[in-house]
Amino acid sequence: MKKVLPFLVILILLLPGSYYLLGRGYFNMHDDLQVMRVYEMGKCFSDGQIPCRWSPDMVYGYGQAMFNYYSAFPYYLGQFIRMTLPVSIMATVKLLFFISLIGAAFGMYLLAKEFWGKTGGILAALFYTYAPYHALDIFVRGALAESFSLAILPFLWLSLYKLIKNPSFVKVFAASILVFLLLTTHNISSMIYAPFTTIWVLFWIIYLKNWRSTRYVVTSGLFGLGLSSFFILPAIFEQNLIRVEYLTLDYSDFHAHFVTLNQLFLERKWGYGPSIFGPYDDLSFQIGWPHWFLGFIVIGIVIYGLGKRKYKEVILAVSLITLFLFTAFLAHPRSLFIWESLPLIKFVQFPWRFLGLSMFFLSFALGNIGNIRLPLKPFFVCLIFILTLALNIGYFKPYNFSRQVKDEDKLTGIGFDLQQKAAILDYLPKTAEIAPPAPAFEVPKVISGEGVIDNFTKQSNRFSFDADIYSASEVVVPVMYFPNWIVIVDNQKVASGINGAHGVISVKLSAGKHIVRGRFTDTPVRSIGNAITVITAVLLFSASVIAERRKNV
């Protein structure tokens, strides 16, 4: 019971912040594509398109290679939930957000407990859960993938620490899975977490002087990378197929999204609008009260720890506070010289995204409060609980929440149209000069020659139609071309064309009756990525079986 009690306490503390994620209803959010993404993933599974890469209803119904580039794991998990539980898509989305929130809390508890004890772990979980940025991600931005990455990070750091401290294949397996989950969850988070995770690993290898653990860490990283290859390889090596400039221009230009010291530390207003240039955002980027000013207590604990010669705790606390200050600095305009000197960092788009890491480091450090002996300590801890909840619970509610809204409201009519055209410039193929300004035409069209088109069907990774052609013709299909769409006419693969400014698929047909089919197939990069994932999974499973047998001998 003693082992379960902290988790029950954390779960109870989570409930006030999770109220709007439970039960019926839905709410507005900036990234209002979560229902659509779960819906598209379901179509992929129905059609056998696994891994899912092409989303047929995006870009006004012309299709988009969304999951070839965009965070995949949360939506695979969503599909698993829908296959095992009788829940709606909206309920699935809210359950995914809830999983990310509870995962972050439990992960931070386990990580902080390793260094600060159970009380410190619960405190760190409380601070991490009720940091305003968490509410921003879930109830304002609707950033499901980033919220998931924040849940995975503490588990990853804990697994790597344990692997370095006492290497074993079981720990290699755990770390590999967590690396895989992070890499397939959020590209941007993976990029900004990587250098800090490397520092974490190097610190403990050097501090513990366990040099032989290096090969275990490298092995877990390679396994994790191998498992995620089906996603990572195309996401990296097929960027030349899309107009990546749209990911960093105009609204996505990082120059417009720095925040001030007042916004970080003092401002308490809460809004649901956009991030805009200057300090007048209708959006909160606060680090949080009482989070940052309790950091002074941690500094006091550090000084106290020096007197008690608790050097490990002192070094860790100082390092975490330093990393907190550095990542908060990266959100401030004074860090512009760093942003302009690192080419890849522009893909982060919003400097305030580093607040996710800031709250991670600060919450972890604040767990140290539970690690010291104080007069009336239970009273002091309870006071912190009450103060943290009182100052932040008001942020954990959405804008324009309704218990009446259903899946149909998002997947039909105007609601569906709005989701189809959202993120229309993301992953736009280079074969398209401009994004379509209107919904796709419903059936293929004969644009030259004469003929009749019948029986058109379109699924996530295929289309087909019958063509009765009177004279040599060119037919365009309401599907945007992206490698490797292939066209088959009368069971013979033919060269397809790319027509118009929107880059739709076209095919030339001779006079007569034809059966035309289209298939979305893998490029060599995707095939290699898929193969590496399968081979890595087999190797990891086989190695696990062998390790278990040796353990039992």
Image (cartoon, rainbow, N blue to C red):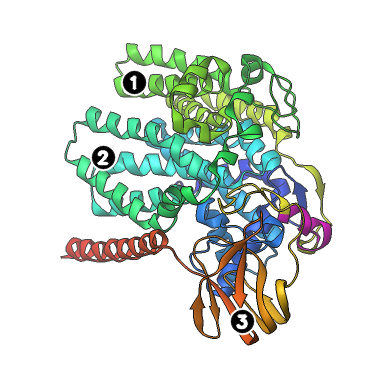
Rendered view: 498 above or below 493: above
* Residue indicated by mark 2: 164
Overall secondary structure of the magenta section:
helix
Q: Nearer the viewer, mark 3 or mark 2?
A: 3
Residue 25 drawn in magenta: no
Q: Earlier in the sequence, mark 1 or mark 3?
A: 1
Q: CA distance from mark 1 to mark 3?
A: 76 Å
Dot 3, crowdedness within 10 Å: few (<14), some or many (≥20)?
some
Q: Which residue is mark 3?
A: 510
Q: Are marks 2 and 1 in contact (CB under 8 Å)?
A: no
Magenta span of residues: 409-420
* Relative side of 218 to 101, left or right: left
**What label sits on residue 315 in the rendered view?**
1
Looking at the rendered structure, the secondary structure element under dot 2 is helix
Q: Residue at x 71, y 22 (%)?
A: 268
Residue 381 at what x, y percent from top left?
56, 27
